[in-house]
Image (cartoon, grey):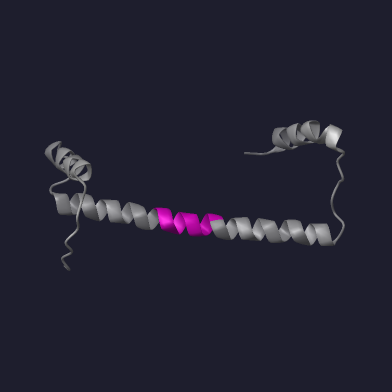
Protein backbone atom coordinates (compact mmCIF):
# COMPACT_ATOMS: atom_id res chain seq x y z
CA UNK A 1 0.00 0.00 0.00
CA UNK A 2 1.44 3.45 -0.89
CA UNK A 3 2.52 5.68 1.98
CA UNK A 4 1.75 9.38 2.18
CA UNK A 5 2.93 11.85 4.75
CA UNK A 6 0.31 14.42 5.65
CA UNK A 7 0.41 17.43 7.91
CA UNK A 8 -2.56 17.85 10.22
CA UNK A 9 -3.45 20.76 12.41
CA UNK A 10 -3.24 20.13 16.14
CA UNK A 11 -7.04 19.99 16.25
CA UNK A 12 -7.22 17.43 13.41
CA UNK A 13 -4.52 15.30 15.02
CA UNK A 14 -6.33 15.37 18.36
CA UNK A 15 -9.56 14.36 16.62
CA UNK A 16 -7.90 11.38 14.92
CA UNK A 17 -6.29 10.35 18.20
CA UNK A 18 -9.64 10.62 20.01
CA UNK A 19 -11.54 8.46 17.54
CA UNK A 20 -8.79 5.83 17.51
CA UNK A 21 -8.66 5.83 21.32
CA UNK A 22 -12.46 5.50 21.38
CA UNK A 23 -12.14 2.32 19.32
CA UNK A 24 -13.88 3.63 16.23
CA UNK A 25 -10.80 2.84 14.13
CA UNK A 26 -7.88 0.51 14.71
CA UNK A 27 -5.30 3.17 13.89
CA UNK A 28 -4.83 6.62 12.40
CA UNK A 29 -4.25 5.23 8.89
CA UNK A 30 -7.65 3.53 8.91
CA UNK A 31 -9.31 6.76 10.05
CA UNK A 32 -7.57 8.82 7.35
CA UNK A 33 -8.49 6.27 4.65
CA UNK A 34 -12.12 6.52 5.74
CA UNK A 35 -11.89 10.31 5.56
CA UNK A 36 -10.54 10.09 2.01
CA UNK A 37 -13.39 7.74 1.05
CA UNK A 38 -15.82 10.32 2.45
CA UNK A 39 -14.17 13.04 0.38
CA UNK A 40 -14.39 10.87 -2.75
CA UNK A 41 -18.08 10.25 -2.10
CA UNK A 42 -18.78 13.95 -1.53
CA UNK A 43 -16.98 14.98 -4.72
CA UNK A 44 -18.90 12.38 -6.77
CA UNK A 45 -22.15 13.57 -5.21
CA UNK A 46 -21.30 17.21 -5.99
CA UNK A 47 -20.60 16.28 -9.63
CA UNK A 48 -23.94 14.46 -9.92
CA UNK A 49 -25.81 17.41 -8.41
CA UNK A 50 -24.06 19.80 -10.79
CA UNK A 51 -24.99 17.61 -13.76
CA UNK A 52 -28.62 17.49 -12.57
CA UNK A 53 -28.64 21.28 -12.22
CA UNK A 54 -27.26 21.67 -15.75
CA UNK A 55 -29.94 19.30 -17.08
CA UNK A 56 -32.70 21.19 -15.28
CA UNK A 57 -31.35 24.53 -16.46
CA UNK A 58 -31.30 23.31 -20.07
CA UNK A 59 -34.86 22.01 -19.75
CA UNK A 60 -35.97 25.38 -18.38
CA UNK A 61 -34.24 27.33 -21.12
CA UNK A 62 -35.69 25.01 -23.76
CA UNK A 63 -39.17 25.56 -22.29
CA UNK A 64 -38.63 29.32 -22.46
CA UNK A 65 -37.59 29.02 -26.11
CA UNK A 66 -40.81 27.12 -26.81
CA UNK A 67 -42.84 29.82 -25.08
CA UNK A 68 -43.83 27.55 -22.22
CA UNK A 69 -43.88 30.02 -19.33
CA UNK A 70 -46.26 32.10 -17.30
CA UNK A 71 -45.69 35.80 -16.76
CA UNK A 72 -46.22 36.98 -13.21
CA UNK A 73 -46.71 40.61 -12.20
CA UNK A 74 -44.46 41.94 -9.45
CA UNK A 75 -47.41 42.33 -7.10
CA UNK A 76 -48.31 38.64 -7.53
CA UNK A 77 -44.77 37.25 -7.24
CA UNK A 78 -44.90 36.28 -3.56
CA UNK A 79 -48.15 34.35 -4.03
CA UNK A 80 -46.81 32.65 -7.17
CA UNK A 81 -43.65 31.55 -5.34
CA UNK A 82 -45.72 30.32 -2.39
CA UNK A 83 -47.82 28.25 -4.82
CA UNK A 84 -44.68 26.76 -6.37
CA UNK A 85 -43.24 25.90 -2.96
CA UNK A 86 -46.52 24.26 -1.91
CA UNK A 87 -46.59 22.11 -5.05
CA UNK A 88 -42.94 20.97 -4.71
CA UNK A 89 -43.05 17.17 -4.24
CA UNK A 90 -39.94 17.16 -2.01
Left or right, 50 with reference to 72: left
Q: Quadrant of residue 84?
A: top right
The structure residue drawn at horizontal position 22% and vertical position 44%, both measured from the top left corner, is 12
Left or right, 87 with reference to 8: right
SS majority, magenta: helix
Please tell me which residue lies in front, 90 or 44: 44
The structure residue drawn at horizontal position 12% and vertical position 38%, both measured from the top left corner, is 21
Where is residue 32? Give x, y as percent: 22, 52
**Any magenta on residue 26?**
no
Where is residue 83? Give x, y as percent: 77, 33
Where is residue 61? Give x, y as percent: 76, 59
Task: Give the magenta-colored segment's residue range.
Answer: 42-49
**Any magenta on residue 46?**
yes
Quarter of the image that includes the N terminus: bottom left
Q: Quadrant of residue 39?
A: bottom left
Please tell me which residue lies in front, 79 or 59: 79
Amino acid sequence: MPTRHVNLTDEQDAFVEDIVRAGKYQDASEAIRDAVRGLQHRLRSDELRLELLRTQLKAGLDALDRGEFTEVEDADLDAALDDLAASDPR
